[in-house]
Image (cartoon, rainbow, N blue to C red):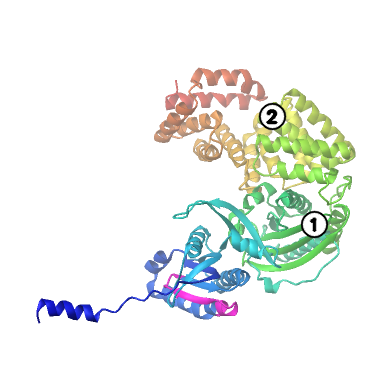
Amino acid sequence: MTGKESREIGKSDRTPIQLFPLQRRLAAVMLADVVGYSRLMSHDEEGTHRRIAVYMREAIDPTIAEYGGRLVRSMGDSMLVEFGSALDAVRCGLDIQQRLADRQSDVQDNRVQLRIGINTGDIIVDNRDIYGHSVNITARLETLAPAGTVCVSQSIYDQTRGQPGLCFVDKGLHRVKNIDYPIRVFEAGYGMASTVSRRRIPRRYIAAIGAAFAVAIAAFGVYAAIYSGTNARENSIIVLPFRNIGGNADDEYFADAITDDLTTDLSRLPRAFVISSATALTYKGKVTDARTIGRDNGVRYVLEGTIRRSGGTAQVNVQLVDTATGAGIWAERFRYDSTSLADLEDSITGRIGASLRVSLQKPRKHDTVGTLAADRNPLDERLHAVAFFVGTPTPEKFLAARLHAEASVKGSPDSAESWSLLGRILIAEHLSFWNNAGPEHVNRADDAVKRALAIDPANAGAHMAAGNILHVRGDYAGALAAFDKVIELDPNFAIAYAQKSRELLYLGRPAEAAAAAEQAIRRSPNDPQIGFFYWVHGRASFFEGKYEEAADWLEKSVQFHSHHWYNRAYLISASALAGRQSAAAKHLAEFQQNFQQYTMQKIKQQYAVSEGARFSSSVAQAATEPLFRGLTMAGLQ
């Protein structure tokens, strides 16, 4: 065959390429990926493959079919699914996660977990796959989803928000690969926590939200009583931040304030061990497994819920979860229609007392007027102040909290709760050197505390503020007595133990100070003030001459409070005295880089002029000598 013939045959055999219009349609797209697939396969290749195949066949595929999804492709460690409905896609994703968690409730290690992303938009379709910008966004959402969760786009959120049983946590804007603009991400969940499927939630309603809380707390008390014979910590609980699902971001303060109030009320139960709301609020906006929370905080029970508010009406979902198993013990949905929170408090105290047959401490006075409606009445102002005051402190939050508290006492001058809160905020601003707080802040705080205690002598918050005022004025024995009173009224007031530790240190009782600091850490292990808790513990250990132990605690303190010179100075000294010379040298180098003005002479002057005057015992005063000796050993000039 000649070359010409070859060319002619090739030309005649060519088939023209036919171009068809691209098929497009709107669809919801779900992409799921196995977390740590390579690690799981390297650990047990055959076992992992078999488990995933079983989960696909028995849990995932039936769930997709139940919601009308079409499995576009599956690649062993991931799958792409198309839905005709955004709502079906979200519910399918949540149910898949729930069913996987249920099947592996007794699996401790190497659990098969999915990340799921869902988006809706225009897609390109052919016989084998789907493509397009919408699919790309779905892929980015999947990578942003924590293990075991479902993350959705703004478009999915807009189409499904307000649907019964669903709630969303706004995770903010994220810049992602190959997308020119930031995308807003929402983490989806059912109205109750993920440990209980939406299908298991009873739909009965009771008139008062207070009764809802009360029944939950009573359930906690009953179950705690059953187990209390086997473990001293079986009656321990954490109240997770109630989630605001009403769609109005301005109502976040209401959910936070209710969380804090409920934690305080639970602390009034005899023998109850309640984790501080300061630690609880660190879980705000996060979807975390109850078993993990129980393990991290050493508690047996988690109380959690959601709030949807409209004017003076609120709808609340509440459930109690056993952290040992992750199983829901009790769950209910309620409506609350009332003119004040007094009904809530009455129902809580009454129902708990009846259920546990115990005598509660004197209930709080119902002295704040106003309704639940956000009309800036005294009650609403107090709730705003509480929400700004709890959590991680900042000058701006303290200022906002003070302004709301001042408005609350102006409208309701007979409110012990509001006067107490104002006193705590004022003295906290002074101790933090924020918002131009000077001696006048201390005087105003003192006046607010006296007003609160005149109305309600059993107000723990007022005694807390009184202790700090006495400390500022140099009455350490009086401050210690005040903090002891706080703990007597509320044994779970974590910061009171830390402040008590500080006073014991000034009074020359370091062993007791260390024990008190441990109590603070135990009751609020993730507190925004945890660096202060570690500091007082480390300093107490230093005063006892336990330098290795002191160095360990002080190193933790520096991790959280790196902007203070004094915990770093004690860390350098403790490391040197404990024989950790390389650590001492490292800490000294960091200290000299960040606090150049603090020479040995400067530190000695500091303690001689201010700190030395604070110590009212020879034991405490003598503890400064090892500080200077350790700093000298480390090489500070």
Q: Nearer the viewer, residue 435 or 525?
A: 435
Residue 468: name its quadrant. top right
Residue 478: name its quadrant. top right
Q: Which residue is labeled 2 in the image? A: 435
Image position of 632 with respect to 487: above or below: above
- Image quadrant occupied by the C terminus: top left
First to last magenta residue range: 62-78
Near mark 2 (Cα within 10 A), the count class, few <14, some 14-19 or many ≥20, is: few
Whether residue 598 sits left or right of residue 519 in the image: it is left
The structure residue drawn at horizontal position 62% and vertical position 65%, both measured from the top left corner, is 324
Whether residue 402 sits left or right of residue 297 in the image: it is right
Query: Depth-wise, is mark 2 or mark 1 nearer the camera?
Result: 1
Q: Nearer the viewer, residue 278 or 95?
A: 95
Q: Nearer the viewer, residue 263 or 162?
A: 162
- State how many labels appear: 2
Whether residue 365 sits left or right of residue 132 in the image: it is right
Q: Which residue is labeled 1 in the image? A: 310
| Residue 481 in sight in this render | no
The structure residue drawn at horizontal position 70% and vertical position 29%, both measured from the top left corner, is 430
The structure residue drawn at horizontal position 59% and vertical position 79%, both measured from the top left corner, is 66
Answer whether labels 2 and 1 touch (C-beta < 8 Å).
no
Q: Secondary structure at mark 1?
A: strand
Q: Mark 2 or mark 1, which has the lower sequence index?
A: 1
Amino acid type at mark 2: Asn
x and y percentages locating residue 25 in the rendered image:
53, 71
Amino acid type at mark 1: Ser
- Image quadrant occupied by the N terminus: bottom left
